[in-house]
Amino acid sequence: MGRIAYVDGRYLPHQQAAVRVEDRGFQFADGVYEVIAVRRGRPVDEDDHLDRLDRSLRELRMPWPMSRRALRLVMRETIRRNHLGAFGALYLQVTRGAAPRSHAFPATAKQTVVMTARPLSLPTAESLGCGIGVVTVADIRWKRCDVKSVSLLATVLGKQVAVEAGCYEAWMVDEQGLITEGTASNAWIVTAGGELVTRRADTAILNGITRMATIGIARAAGLRFVERPFSVAEAKGAAEAFITSTTSMIRPVIRIDGVAVGSGRPGGTTVRLVDWYLDHVEAEGRTV
Amino acid sequence: MGRIAYVDGRYLPHQQAAVRVEDRGFQFADGVYEVIAVRRGRPVDEDDHLDRLDRSLRELRMPWPMSRRALRLVMRETIRRNHLGAFGALYLQVTRGAAPRSHAFPATAKQTVVMTARPLSLPTAESLGCGIGVVTVADIRWKRCDVKSVSLLATVLGKQVAVEAGCYEAWMVDEQGLITEGTASNAWIVTAGGELVTRRADTAILNGITRMATIGIARAAGLRFVERPFSVAEAKGAAEAFITSTTSMIRPVIRIDGVAVGSGRPGGTTVRLVDWYLDHVEAEGRTV
């Protein structure tokens, strides 16, 4: 059974799903997106994703292309038609639409809505628990990283550095030597004192949905937690480190630029967070 | 007669010209482009544009999608099929192609090549000579503005500020209060001493083809010229100011944030540059 994509009101075989060459998403990166995990056909943290989409749209002064209710229905239909099974990911993108090429907002253009979905292996505590390596790269992105836009070229280049270094992710470093976030994940450390640390969600990072869920889990578990930036040196010397993202969930970072973090093995706090986060995903998969 | 677009080896009616929803140009802004003026069917400063395209591709580690010779042939055929007449603009975009969504470069993906063209009114000394207003906005772009990528969301937002202020262009200002460039043009001033000033082409600006042509013209005319950044205050107090770009060519700036520049009318040096630049375009339109 082939994949099906939703494009502007139609469900099409994935290979035929296309957008106009003058779509502003293609010519200007003038669009926003969300990636949503799907457990047993149910979008995980759906309201949080739609709230963030709402914020991204507002920051770029785009209206909703359809009602929130209608978008939820299209999400469900896209999930259904793609037979995601136990687990998968839904991708949705909204652009300012196709219009004769000109930088300023078009006077009249119908926004473009694209949705795709694909089945994925269901992550387990074992698969998530094996540690990953990260490399650090300069953060060369624009100054509105809080908007989940498709203006992703800087992160593409950063991720490629990671891949070529045999690493899972690249952590981006600002001009003060402080880590902002990963190219497709948020960055965390656990201090020797057992405190969880992640950067405050200002305009320098995207406020990850898994980041927010992890904060909630940590608080509920009574873990100490603080939002503040940390340097590359502090991260290398931390007791533990990990990343959070929708599709990577939570993964222990055991090497930064080749330097072992803590014992060089996944940390105890991180491993517990992985378990709790998987519980959270299971609970979301049971939501009525 | 309808417009024709070239997409990956095919010439299609413009309305049918499309790219896959998983094209990396649409999902990651992972592509580069050029806009080339066309005078009497001939691309203006063609070699300079193709040299810059070559540089953009190399910086993003993309190969040429076809030989330079083949690309020139497609350009000519796209121009021919679109009946540009006296004047027009050719748009060409190259992306890393369509591939299952993942930040890092795809192992195998055929690059996407899109070309469109449209006829435009031939600018005249009169139409170019009437002054324009600019507003200043914070430069929030990424740190590789020397690459002509489609990662243009920041300039879209800047241009929109200009349009809503009733202005033609927005000049972007870095953290030191220095003007980098316009959202789709380079920024210039003429000092009280008659010296032409424009920012050095480092990673903070795009080295415009019209910028380079104007430098050549100024030198040939024996005008004094220096590459250095200038502040908003210096620009407001300058004798003259102007912008350069492929489609805007050279236009006098007579107001910056509502403040009159010089006499508040197009400056004499700028007006002469407009004439000389139009001569250059005419000469390019006669190239064999």
Image: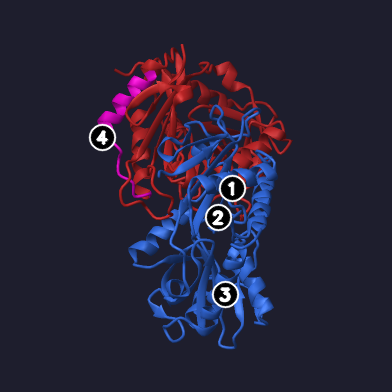
Chain colours: A blue, B red
Real-space Cα distance between discs 4 and 3?
47 Å
Task: Give B224 or A41, whichever is nearer the viewer.
Answer: A41
Label 1 chain ID = A
Tell me where the magenta segment starts and ends, as one range: B60-79
Of circles 1 and 4, which is in front? 1
Q: Are marks 4 and 3 on the same chain?
A: no
Mark 2–mark 1 distance (CA, rounded to whole Å): 8 Å
Earlier-in-chain disc, 3 versus 1? 1
Quadrant in the picture for the C terminus of chain A: bottom right
Callout 1 amino acid: Arg
Q: Please name the residue shown 30% across and 44% down the image.
A: B63
Residue bearing mark 1: A76
Q: Residue A136 location in percent, x, y?
A: 44, 68
| Residue A230: mark in rendering | 3
The residue at 60%/76% (across/down) is A197
B64 in relation to A126, above or below: above
Residue corresponding to mark 4: B67
What amino acid type should be assigned to the residue bearing mark 2? Gly
Query: Chain letter of disc 3?
Result: A
The mark nearer the N terminus, 2 or 3, is 2
Q: Position of residue B189 (x, y in %)?
A: 58, 38
User: The residue marked by circle 4 belongs to what chain?
Assistant: B
> Looking at the image, is mark 3 or mark 1 nearer the viewer?
1
Q: Are marks 4 and 2 in contact (CB under 8 Å)?
A: no
Q: Nearer the viewer, residue A179 or B165?
A: A179
Is-magenta flag for residue B74?
A: yes
Q: Which residue is mark 2?
A: A41
* SS at mark 1 in the image: helix
> Secondary structure of the magenta portion, mostly?
helix
Q: Secondary structure at mark 4?
A: loop
Query: Are both tags, 3 and 1, on one chain?
Result: yes
